[in-house]
Image: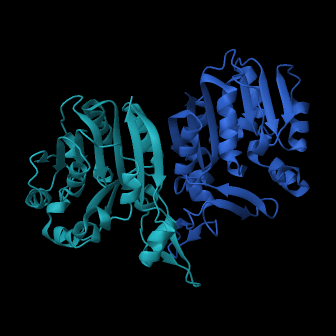
Chain colours: A blue, B cyan
Amino acid sequence: MAQNIYDDPQFFVGYSGLRRSVEGLAGAPEWPALKALLPDLTGRRVVDLGCGFGWFCRFAREAGAGEVLGLDLSENMLARAREMASDPAITYRRADLEALELPVASFDLAYSSLAFHYVENLSGLLATIARALVPGGRLVFSAEHPIYTAPRRPGWTVDSDGHKSWPVDHYLAEGPRRTNWFAEGVVKQHRTIGAYLNLLVSAGFTVSHLEEWGPSQAQIAVQPELAEERERPMFFIVAVERR
Amino acid sequence: MAQNIYDDPQFFVGYSGLRRSVEGLAGAPEWPALKALLPDLTGRRVVDLGCGFGWFCRFAREAGAGEVLGLDLSENMLARAREMASDPAITYRRADLEALELPVASFDLAYSSLAFHYVENLSGLLATIARALVPGGRLVFSAEHPIYTAPRRPGWTVDSDGHKSWPVDHYLAEGPRRTNWFAEGVVKQHRTIGAYLNLLVSAGFTVSHLEEWGPSQAQIAVQPELAEERERPMFFIVAVERR
């Protein structure tokens, strides 16, 4: 079973205070890039893997989706998601992405925001998603970029001239990374971009788009603290289609 | 027209002394990874973009390829390639990858080793390659990894404890990078992995494989100085098929 860090009280309080938790999709600067990769949602059956507070599930319904299934391991997050929506077409269900079961050919879109880098058995999960999608169905997801997850000491290095850089090491050493983010010992799975893409291809997907996300100049003008995200990507975003 | 740094006398002397120049494919540690992505070459028509001394063209013929076309901008390299092979099925021709023309549907395999990161008009080149391949034809190439090309100061940082890391910055700032490698002012084009893949998809290719290359433990046992290449990838390798 996956680590359920989102139900750690200290973590949950910290995470709940993030702009993306309070403001939802509008508070996530990578959301416009993800949104641009979505198909027309009208009447589509959608599954959100790691739905958190359910912001995307509600967005999908507002954009015309049919049935929406939101999955998360965290009881805290599911409880909050259920509080915030009374839409009978949205179902929130507890699920462990390490051992997920989904009905075959039942979804047109699978979506996941910043969850896959927690998953150890990614090949199993991708096979499940591929089976659950109809042919031509789309998977759009974001995950932490391996440049961000690789380092032994993830954090900016500042030169004597004030110049920031991100010290990459251990990039090709795939496997768990323990970090302290709102709680101690949060475990992420570090994988290269190549590993993600090859697992997707093996699972029966065709790659449509890969974006190593950074903020636009317009976003930096509004939120200058985002500028450093152009120095090294924190996230990447992928769109693939089931063959 | 592309910068013709390989015909700079100082550069050419330096480059000619590299292990990969002296020993050929066996002297390039990423060659086994490239070779693993090649189709059966028997009877295949092959074009090598940036053929250098012609090592791959000769390999392709030895592996059973039919007609082989080796293209390079450097007269020095083409002269050396012609000296080393008298195979009438290999043609060496001077060509600028910035403005390449190739006959339509005339090749089964396009190959390129460490040349694409010099090309500014990569979308034009990929469109030319796509047209020149038959449907189902394959493009296999290596290029310098954006982690390697991004930094303002490309080079290892060594901590007080002797630990090495690679200071990534400017990753999302695509465009030219001037470096000093055997000669001053060698110009490379820095692009994200995402940019490479999206250009390939737009040009009509389906992504088969992406590898961010690092040496195997067996290679490190023989050449311990390769170990640092596992800290951050210097190259990436792609195989795609023309749709």
Which of the 4 image quarters holds residue B55?
Answer: bottom left
Pick the quarter of the image with the C terminus of chain A.
Answer: top right
Height in image: B204 above or below B231? Answer: above
Where is residue B64? Give x, y as percent: 24, 46
Where is residue B135? Give x, y as percent: 33, 28
Count all numbered tags in the image, as a single digit: 0
| Farthest-out residue, top | A43
Residue A173, can we see it?
Answer: yes
Residue A113, can we see it?
Answer: no
Height in image: B207 above or below B25? Answer: above
Q: Residue at x 36, y 53 (%)?
A: B35
Q: Residue at x 59, y 64 (%)?
A: A173
- Taking B77 as reference, is B154 left or right? right
Height in image: B188 above or below A132? Answer: below
Q: Nearer the viewer, residue A173 or A155?
A: A173
Q: Nearer the viewer, residue A190 or B69?
A: B69
Q: Residue at x 31, y 67 (%)?
A: B27
Where is residue A4? Give x, y as percent: 84, 51
Where is residue A108? Give x, y as percent: 66, 22
